[in-house]
Amino acid sequence: MADHILTKGFKATTGKAYIRGQVVQMTAAWTVDVATAGTQILVGVCIEDVDQVKVDTGKVIIGVDVVGITRCIASAAIVAGARVTAATGGKIVTMTAAAAFPTVNCLGIAMGAATANNDEIDVLLTPGARF
C-alpha cells in the first residue's frame, strides 16, 4: 500500500530547534513556528530535526507534511479515532467538547493510540477542519 503525503517547504522562524513530529503553525506567508495551541493556524507536522544554530541563520526551509498520514508526538494519552489538536511544544492532544468550533482547529484524527507523553502516533491530517 502506498502512502500519499503532500509535503511542502516552509521557512523556519528563528530562535528554536525543530523536532520531527512537532505540529507547526503559520506565522507569515510560507513561514512556520512550533505550535503551542489549537487556536493557532495549524498547517502541518515537521518531518525533520533541525538544530537551533542552523535555524538561526535565517535560511532554513523545513519540510512540513500538510496532507496525508504522518507521525506526531503526543502530550498525553490519546485513543485511536480521537480528533487531535496542537498543545505546548508542538505536541498533540485530544480535542475536548469544550474545545469545539469556532475557537480550536483540528489537526487530524489519531490513527493509533498513545499511552503517555512523548509517544509517537500516526495522524490523518485534516487541514482547516473544525468540529
Image (cartoon, rainbow, N blue to C red):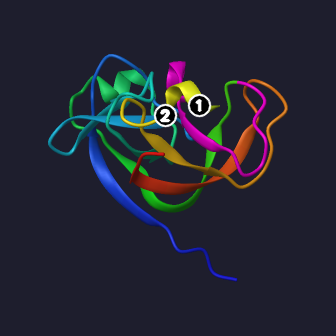
95 horizontally vs 116: left or right: left
Task: Residue at 51%, 48% (x, y): give it.
Answer: 47
Looking at the picture, does residue 112 appear above or below residue 72? below
Looking at the picture, does residue 112 appear above or below residue 7? above
Q: Quadrant of residue 103?
A: top left
Task: Residue at 59%, 31% (x, y): give it.
Answer: 97
Disc 1 residue crowd, few under 14, some 14–19, many 20+, Cα 10 Å: few
Q: Amino acid at mark 1?
A: Ala
Q: Circle 1 sits in a helix, a strand or a loop, which is it?
A: helix
Disc 2 residue crowd, few under 14, some 14–19, many 20+, Cα 10 Å: few
Q: Tell me, yes or no, whether the two marked residues, 2 and 1, touch with CB atoms within 8 Å.
A: yes
Q: Circle 2 sits in a helix, a strand or a loop, which is it?
A: loop
Residue identifier under label 1: 97
Q: Position of residue 73 (x, y in %)?
A: 65, 35
> 98 or 72, which is in the foreground?
98
Image quadrant occupied by the N terminus: bottom right
Q: Which mark is residue 100?
A: 2
Q: Position of residue 92 (x, y in %)?
A: 59, 33
Task: Residue at 32%, 16% (x, y): give it.
Answer: 15
Mark 2–mark 1 distance (CA, rounded to whole Å): 5 Å
Q: Position of residue 64 (x, y in %)?
A: 41, 50
Magenta residues, start to end: 76-90
Q: Position of residue 26 (x, y in %)?
A: 27, 37
Q: Amino acid at mark 2?
A: Ala
Q: Is residue 37 magenta?
A: no
